[in-house]
Amino acid sequence: MKVSKHMIIVAVVTVIIAGTISAMVFIKPDPEKVVVDAIEKQLNVTDYTTEYNLSYQTKSGGVTLDAKGMITVFKTPDATKVTLSLDTFGEKIRIDQYQTGNETIQCMSSLFNTTCKKADSSSMPVNTPEEQAKALQNLIKTNVLKLKYLSEKNIAGRTCDEVQTSYNPSQLGSESGASNNIDVVLCLDKEKGIPLEMLMNLAISSEDSLDVKMTLTEISFDKVYITVPEVTEEFDEFKYSS
């Protein structure tokens, strides 16, 4: 079969186009830009509600403990409410945390009553999305945070960029007791920047560790209304500190 010059040119052009498309497909985004852009998008979202399934596992002294629960975040332009519901050791615990400006109120509900206390947000078991985003911003500025782009995923019908973050607390002068890196994988919503999934591993020692997983189940951008409760007593830091 005689091969014409035209056929050769077409074949070469096809190979070049295919190679270009292949290279474009496998080029991964800059992970720092992905995270920085996501934080900016997230901080600009005024009203939303997110609901996550939560699971965590702690290992200490050869003993492994598991717990499951749910985290719901309600965000308005002026306030944030985070509800943490846990089922651990056969006991159900619910904590509602409200933040307006510089004021944080925590309500703890048990089988018999609900107590609301004014508190320092740094002592709370759950950080608001804004606090998490700003903490990530600060880590990026310190240059101790290692970032790696992993993949694009679909969670609860939304597309997100999966990025691995890693740092060693000792590099920041932290006294947390962790001797190894804190590794966190975030999947950040492409449109709004909100985390759709978080996987965290904290190695405190060779025998002690904490693994946490949060995965989005529902998200809404409808207008949110938050009613902040009255404070019933002062916060007992010793009672709630780990």
Image (cartoon, rainbow, N blue to C red):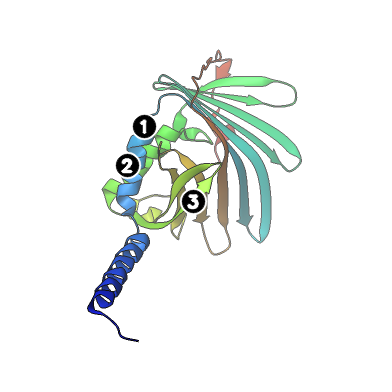
Quarter holding the C terminus is top right
Judging from the image, what secondary structure is the residue with disc 3 in?
A: strand
Judging from the image, what secondary structure is the residue with disc 2 in?
A: helix
Is 30 situated above or below 235?
below
The three-letter code of the residue at mark 2 reads Asp
- Residue beneath the point at 30% across and 48% down: 33
Residue assigned mark 3 = 153
Q: Position of residue 195 (x, y in %)?
A: 46, 41
Q: Quadrant of residue 72?
A: top right
Q: Tell me which label, 3 or 2, sits earlier in the chain.
A: 2
Q: Nearer the viewer, mark 3 or mark 2?
A: 3
In this view, the residue farthest toward the front is 2
Cβ atoms at labels 3 and 2 below 8 Å apart: no
Q: How far is the residue under mark 1 from the one under mark 3?
A: 22 Å
Q: How far is the residue under mark 1 from the one under mark 2?
A: 10 Å
Cβ atoms at labels 1 and 3 below 8 Å apart: no
Q: Position of residue 170 (x, y in %)?
A: 37, 55
Q: Tell me which label, 1 or 2, sits earlier in the chain.
A: 2
Q: Residue 43 — which label?
A: 1
Residue assigned mark 2 = 37
The three-letter code of the residue at mark 1 reads Leu
